[in-house]
Amino acid sequence: METVDTRQEILIQASRLFKKLGYRATTTREIAKAVNIKQPSLFHHFPNKKAIVEEIFSLSLNEAAVRIEEACRRDGPASERLHQYLVWDLSTLHRMPMAMSAIYTGDALKSEEFAELAAKLKAFYHSLEDLISQGIDSGEFVEIDPMLGRLIVASMTIAHLEYAEEVTVTDPDRIAREGADLILRAFRREQN
Amino acid sequence: METVDTRQEILIQASRLFKKLGYRATTTREIAKAVNIKQPSLFHHFPNKKAIVEEIFSLSLNEAAVRIEEACRRDGPASERLHQYLVWDLSTLHRMPMAMSAIYTGDALKSEEFAELAAKLKAFYHSLEDLISQGIDSGEFVEIDPMLGRLIVASMTIAHLEYAEEVTVTDPDRIAREGADLILRAFRREQN
DNA sequence: GTCTATAAGCAGATAGAC
DNA sequence: GTCTATCTGCTTATAGAC
């Protein structure tokens, strides 16, 4: 077995355990057992436990941060730009072999140990609130506090992610489109 | 200071720490420090750390489980029964001095240690899915998997709870009504 | 009802052989 | 690249004085 496979397997098994037990409650011994290696072997692939969660996080957040910022700056209806972003986000996440909902649901980034990751996430949330504000100003969305809008988008994204992790996804693109539609329903003003 | 006050204060401070750090990551020393007592004094009020989280959980779940089941069996439009339930749920949670979102967001009930609590929550979710199914069958709600509907209701409830914990709530009833309206928007079919 | 002292166990991480 | 053995520190919880 090549190194890269073990590395990938660590990320997959760790994400599933983080989802089930939480980051702090998941021990490096449990991760190692799921990967079928002994606990100290983990430290050949990652310098520490924190680095595992950071890599899973980066996998989903780095590109998302760029794309949401782009969506903020583009022209056109805010609801369409948000919809496009959500379709990309959901289809990307649905394709990943890791249990991505673990990251946002879990306890990891709430502790001060992960202040840097939390700051990145905060910047992402700021762009999302900006985009929602644009939609409220243009009359596309109902008038809610953009912060509440952001919390709803984030929580519904996680809910949809958890749903897709339970049922068998055959067409990630279709389920991503349905998810984006559902999220926008929650605060898009009726057109007719 | 009376015993009951210290007990209550432990529940409040513990819930805030559970929300911030997660159940497993919050140490009994940290809880004790927040309450201004020493760590072993906690064990005079609660037999163990688990009992603290169980009490916070029971505070919100016991009555909720009875009420959602009643809502399932009553007559009338399912959307109205769900709305009434959500208004009660949100206004009750918004009035509590504990950080109630901690319980559902957190890592606590995912571990096997809390299998009993998880079973109670599962029964609650079952009733919620039943009520959503009724609304889909009657044409009040859009046609989605009831499981996805349940995940959305639960995640939006938590989002609204987190929102109310951030901003200062002056009128719990009004904000509860607005929250229930917003949650139902997500999958109620337009009437006109 | 709160304290100090401490037990018993488990965590993440390192050393060094193979 | 994986192993066995082990260190150090921190965790929950108990014992028993006041």
Image: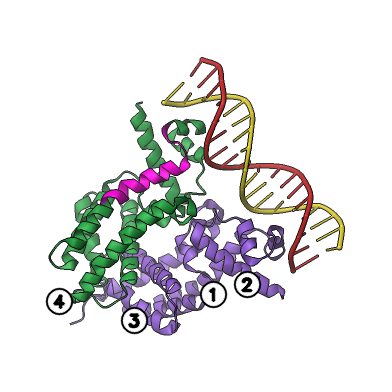
Chain colours: A purple, B green, C yellow, D red
Query: Does label 4 lie on the same chain as label 3?
Result: no
Residue designated by label 1: A97
Report the residue marked by disc 4: B191
For disc 2, the marked residue is A8
Residue B156 x, y percent position in the rendering: 32, 63
Q: Amino acid at mark 2?
A: Gln
The chain under label 1 reads A
User: Residue at left 45%, top 67%?
Assistant: A124
Instruction: Judge depth for marks 4 and 1 and give the one in front.
Output: 1
Among the two numbered marks 3 and 1 on one chain, the one whose residue lies closer to the N terminus: 3
Type of residue at label 1?
A: Pro
Q: Answer with left or right where residue A41 lies relative to residue A143.
A: right
Q: Residues within 10 Å of mark 2 (few under 14, many from 20)?
A: some
* Quarter of the figure that contains the C terminus of chain A: bottom left
The residues bearing labels 4 and 1 have C-alpha atoms spaced at a distance of: 40 Å
Label 2 with label 1: CB-CB less than 8 Å: yes
- Which chain letter goes with mark 4? B
Can residue A84 be seen by looking at this rendering? Answer: no
